[in-house]
Every structure is written in structure tokens, then in C-alpha cells.
Image (cartoon, rainbow, N blue to C red):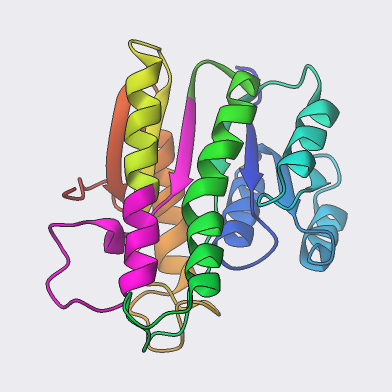
Amino acid sequence: MAQKTVLLIGASRGLGFAMAEEYLKRGVQVIATGRENSRKALSALAARYPALLRVETVEITQPDEVDALRSRLGATRVDILFVNAGVKNDDSETAANVSTGEFVRVMVTNALSPIRVIERLKDCVTPGGTIAVMSSGQGSLTNNTNGQYDVYRGSKAALNMFMRSFAARQGDAPETLLLMAPGWVRTDMGGPDARLTIEESIPALVDTLTASEGRTGLHYLDYLGREVPW
């Protein structure tokens, strides 16, 4: 069986870095990206897995950098394209009092940029491969019962809608399309009070990605493979 290749966008820290490490442990070829000044951990990881890990640079909020990455990839084909992007504003801010600049920053990073990356890099994915993006359970309209984290929730809900539109434009294409909710994980962004460790979330999330291969259409799943309500 041919070795699989995964292109991980946004893998310099947190969940994205953990995914890169998990795939490498499983013997999967990985192309992992980070911003120009955030690749130290990835470079150290590449020293441990020189035959499996290729490190690339891209700032996904800059379309010209995404174009440059596409050019560098050339004829490279991957089995999985996974886009991981997530920032948040201050937890105390509501949609009513967040600054316009901060709202734009979160929305551009979490919603607009990932779908632009997918549109630009989709032709790198082998026919019948997987295109996935890191969403969140907080992007679920149904599950919003406490009204907190307005802007972050809104950005992930917008990402979900953009992916749904993308899926509709693909028609009956054979690719698997996934919105992944990793759970509330103890990272710099998730904070120390989060329910899950990276070790509890990411290996299970990778298992879910693997188990979903060949499942056509768009699916909104948590890290254990359970459907998340829209």
C-alpha cells in the first residue's frame, strides 16, 4: 500500500502541532505549515522525523502567501488536506461591545482564511481524498444554550456555513469533507480548565479522520466521530 501524505495547515503549535506529531508516529508523510516566526517546534520535530516531515511557511490570512505555497507544492498530491486555524478575542466581550478591528481579526482568521486555503489547495488532494477543517462544537447553533463567547462561536458557525457552501459547489465529487470538533482541550487557547488533554483529543481525532476516509459528502463530527448538530 502506498504511503499516505497529509498536508496540515497551521501546525506550529497546539492542536495542529499535536496532529503533525501523531501522524508522524503512525508513519504518515506530513507536510506541516506555520507562520514565518513560529516554526521552531516544527523544525525540532523535523529533526526527529527527517524522512517523513516537510516544513513549509504560510500566513493563511495573506492570499499571496497561500498562492506561493501552492506554487511550491507543484505536482505534490496529498491524501488529506487539513486546515487548522483558531484565534479568539477576550472571553468577556460580546458581539455588542467587541471592537470592529478585533471582530474582523477573528472572522478573517477563523472563517474566511481557512475556506480560501481550501479553495486554493483543493486540487492538491487526490481524487477520493479528504478535505477537513478544524471547527468547534461552539460553532453549533443548536448547542449554544449559554450565550457566551459570541465572536468565537460566530466565527466557527461562519466557517461551517462556508464549508457547507463549498460542499454544495462540489456536487457529487468523491472527496470526504469534514468539519472536526476537537472538544475543549488544554492548550494555550483552551486554557488550563479545559476538560480534555491533547492526548485524549488528538489521537482520537486522527482515528476519526482515518475511519471517515471514503465517506463522501460533508460531515460535522467531534473527535470521537459523533455527529455534531448544526
Residue 155: within the magenta?
yes
Q: Residue at x 72, y 49 (%)?
A: 62
Asked where in the image residue 21 lies, by quadrant, the reply is bottom right
Residue 82: within the magenta?
no
Instruction: Evaluate whether residue 182 shows in this view.
Output: no
In the displayed structure, does residue 120 sit left or right of residue 71?
A: left
37 versus 77 height, above or below: below
The span picked out in magenta is: 130-158
In the displayed structure, does residue 66 sit left or right of residue 71?
A: left
Instruction: Evaluate whether residue 204 shows in this view.
Output: yes
159 versus 67 height, above or below: below
Q: Residue at x 37, y 56 (%)?
A: 156
Q: Report x, y in % for residue 210.
A: 43, 36
Q: Report x, y in % for residue 127.
A: 52, 12
Q: Residue at x 42, y 39 (%)?
A: 209
In the displayed structure, does residue 34 sit left or right of residue 108?
A: right
143 versus 113 height, above or below: below
Q: Report x, y in % for residue 35.
A: 77, 58
In the displayed structure, does residue 136 sit left or right of residue 114?
A: left
- Residue nearer the viewer, 186 or 29: 186
Placement of the N terminus among the 4 image quadrants: top right
Number of marks in picture:
0
Asked where in the image residue 192 lies, by quadrant, the reply is bottom left
- Residue nearer the viewer, 11 or 156: 156
Q: Report x, y in % for residue 166.
A: 40, 28
Q: Residue at x 37, y 81 (%)?
A: 194
- Residue nearer the viewer, 198 or 192: 192
Asked where in the image residue 72 lies, by quadrant, the reply is top right
